[in-house]
Image: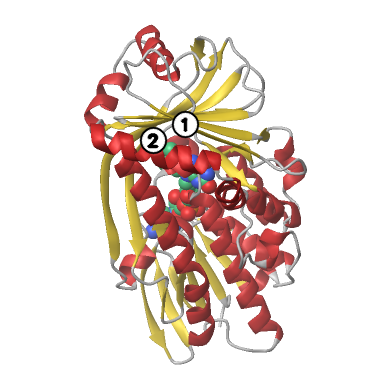
Amino acid sequence: MAERILIAGAGPAGAATALAMLRAGLPATDLAVLDAMAGMEAKTRGPDSRILALNAGSCRLLQVLGVWPALEAEAHPMRSIALSDTALEADIRPLSLGFEADEDEPLAYLVPLGLLQNVLRQALAEAGVTIRPEIIRSFREDGDGLLVETNRGRQSVSLLIGADGARSAVRRMAGIPVHGWAYGQVAITGIVEHSGEHRGEAVQHFLPGGPFALLPLDEGRSSMVWSERAEVAKRMLALPPEDLRAEIDRRAAGWRGTITGIGRISSHPLSLGLARRFVGPRVALVADAAHVVHPLAGQGLNLGFGDAATLAELVIEHLRLGLDPGDPALLETYQARRRPAAAAMAAATEGMNRLFSNAVGPLRVLRDAGLNLVNRSDRLKTMFRQAAAGRGAHEPRLMRGEPI
Ligand SMILES: Cc1cc2nc3c(=O)[nH]c(=O)nc-3n(C[C@H](O)[C@H](O)[C@H](O)COP(=O)(O)OP(=O)(O)OC[C@H]3O[C@@H](n4cnc5c(N)ncnc54)[C@H](O)[C@@H]3O)c2cc1C
């Protein structure tokens, strides 16, 4: 038998899952990582200007994996969040809800996705794992293992981890259906420059077309995540740069002074997806392969890192006891620990997007009453703050900052 564990997809979630197992002592010879696009990113992928808000749990995981020092110089703290809920034309956008981090730890750090991916892949290479440019064609149970066929050959493994993103081929081949739908919204992302200070504060304006967020980078610059109805987004993306800047400035509503410049823009169609099962015989799905949520709460990869940390912990515990890492009981435990968290986040972001992305009068009154209630309740705010900072009840060890 060749490698015991095969990971399909070396995005941030697949790479972190692999690194977590290697750091816990899994020999590099027991692990294989494939990626359909390995080595071809620059030529075939369009620009991706995503900068992700990583909560404290994710940052602790990256610290234990030893990659935080390579990210730190480009990681910017988010110390508070302010939300508003108004029409685009409104002259004044009052604050509807705001909350701040505890003194000791920011709510999140903003980290460029491209850098994160490169740093994780570099760490894998240094640990002796080369990402193979291969695609899985099929797999089936075969005796004590799973026989996996790729475009380069066959191998038998104990566990196949599908970390191959939202359109996961592993999920499809395992016959796992997905609940979900397209939002009809597109997220326009990019770095904007502004005349006002942010002082580490993130803002999110809930506009009828979708939420418009500015997340703090270095002073005078923010990362924009502007969710907009698909047809409007298409028009916006076709505008000359000065007109696009003016549209962004309208949405930013003066909370950061004037928007003075925009960097490289990228666009991302938005959808909701939740795999009905996170596991199959000798198969486990992690991150976007298992769930895709609206970016309005900035939680997609934070959930994905939670999956990676949980699965790595369970696999390593099994291997240390001499047990099979593809054991059905292990896979059931993984699903039981992770699917409820993803389902809850999918429901929360779906609910918020529906409630806020419209201009229906009675709904506005209701939601503003709700936001005001939360704003005045210290207990509720503490709950929200803890969720944003990744301090849930059942965090895996890596997310608590402990090695496996
Ligand atoms: C606008 C926007 C803003 C966001 N903001 C945040 C945020 O602030 N915080 C946060 O936590 N999350 C955020 N997210 C979510 C986050 O970007 C994703 O959850 C994360 O990038 C998913 O990582 P992944 O490794 O699961 O998938 P991907 O990054 O999609 O990686 C999948 C990998 O699998 C490979 N692959 C695909 N098919 C195959 C195959 N058949 N065989 C082998 N390999 C294959 C691909 O080449 C790729 O390398 C945001 C998302 C969007 C759209």
Please tell me which residue lies in front, 24 or 378. Answer: 378
Name which residue lies at 68% across and 56% down: 61
The color scheme shown is: secondary structure
Q: Quadrant of the N terminus?
A: bottom right
Above or below for 46 versus 338: above
**Mark 2: which amino acid?**
Asp
Observer-nearest of 29 and 54: 54
Q: 302 or 162, which lies in front? A: 302
Q: Quadrant of the C terminus?
A: bottom right
| Residue contact between numbered discs 1 and 2, judged by CB atoms under 8 Å | yes
How far is disc 1 from disc 2 in space, using C-alphas?
7 Å
Q: Which residue shows up at 52% across the image and 82% down it?
A: 326
Q: Which mark is residue 404?
A: none
Q: Is residue 67 visible?
A: yes
Residue receiving disc 2 = 368
Q: Position of residue 312 (x, y in %)?
A: 62, 70
Residue bearing the label numbered 1: 96
Amino acid at dot 1: Ser
The answer to whether 214 appears left or right of 90 in the picture is right
